[in-house]
Structures are given as structure tokens and as C-alpha cells.
Image (cartoon, rainbow, N blue to C red):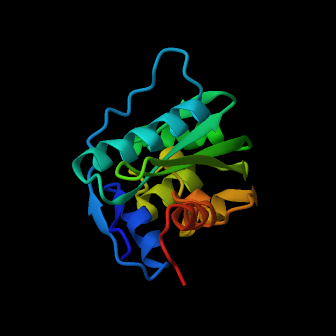
Amino acid sequence: MQRPVILASTSRYRRELMNRLHLPFDVHAPEVDETALVGETPRALAERLALEKANAVAARFPEAVVIGSDQVADLAGEALGKPGDHARATAQLRRMRGQTLIFQTAVAVVCHATGFVQRDLAPVRVVFRELSDAAIDRYLLVEQPYDCAGSAKSEGLGIALLSAIDSDDPTALVGLPLIRTCQMLRAAGVELL
């Protein structure tokens, strides 16, 4: 008998990605404080939060296989989170134009009943084009990506902001690296095919 699978996330983007697997799963909010620790790098923040989210939900559902994920936009070692509103998104994109960022996308899969714990990172190197203030404003008015790390949605019009993407896991930039997630789910005993 296969254990239930739970996505520890409130992200609609991660839910949409999980739906691609045609695997029954539930969604539960992890209720984790996402504040960075003093001196914590963007990479360490993403890895810690992915594991904390998975563990928070697994504590309530110990028999389930729980997936936690987090993404932090890394601009030269500075963490850029979700902007929340138009003004902050504008400021972020102005800082990012012409720059190379690493979107640090972490995933963790845990099952408390079996003691299974795996965590991995899928960094995505993204090069932003030089963008005019008018182009940034037009983009934000169309996409309103205020709930996205770094104010950019590559799966939509945000692709026009970019000149290059480099990743070995193509869904990582959207928020959940499915190649790594599938590997971990199989290792946890979840049959995908």
C-alpha cells in the first residue's frame, strides 16, 4: 500500500507542477516562519526552509510522504524574496536588469514514520536583459508576479525579461524541481509510473 503524499505548500505554482505527475496528493500549509537567520546565505535559507516546511507538515501527518520546497532569488549573495506589491517588484526588477541571478530552489521529502529524509538544491542561473523602466512597468501590470521570488514568472510573459536560463531541472525556476522530486519520491517508496 502506497503512503499518502502531501505537498507542504500554499503555492499555486507548486500545486500546478505536482499535478503534472498525475499522482494523488493533498496540500497543507506548513506555517513556517520564512525569516532569514542572521548571516544566512540565500542557498542555506532555501535549503533550511524546504526541510522545515516538510517537517512541519510531517509532524501532523507522520505516515505521509511530505514534500517541502522553497525558492530564494540570489543576487550576488543577497536574498530577494517575494515582493508583495508593485512598488517592491519595480525596485527588484530595476536592480536585476542586466544582472545574473541564481534562483536557489530547494526541495525536501520526508516521512516521519519511516525516518526518510532527503533534501537537494536545484540552482537555476538566470540572466536578465537590460530593461527600461517602461518595460518593467508594462510587465508588472500584465503579470502581477507579486507572489514570486524575484518578481519574475518565466512560465508567462516574464520570459521576455530574460536573455538566458541555465538549469538541469527545467521546472526548478517555476518553484519545484520535478526531476529531483521524482527521484526522492521513488526513494521514499512512492511509485510514479
Q: Residue furthest left?
A: 60
Q: Nearer the viewer, residue 109 or 158?
A: 109
Locate residue 1 relative to residue 71 in the image: left or right.
left
Residue 22, percent from left and from top:
44, 83
Judge from the rendering whether residue 188 lies leftward or rightward of residue 144; answer left or right: right
Question: What is the quadrant of residue 55 in the picture?
Answer: top left
Q: Is residue 80 above or below residue 155?
A: above
Which part of the image, by quadrant, shows the C terminus? bottom right
Q: What is the x, y in percent for residue 173?
A: 60, 57
Q: In this view, does 66 lie to the left or right of 99?
A: left
Task: Give whichever of 191, 131 is nearer the camera.
Answer: 191
Query: Which one is nearer the viewer's eye here, 63 or 170?
Result: 63
The answer to whether any part of residue 30 appears in the image is no
Give x and y (percent) for residue 14: 43, 63
Residue at 25% across, 54% down: 61
Q: Residue at x 57, y 62 (%)?
A: 187
Position in image of residue 1 (x %, y %): 36, 76
In the picture, measured across the screen, residue 22 lies left or right of residue 176, that is left
* Relative depth, front residue between 98 and 54: 54
Confirm whether residue 17 shows in the render: yes
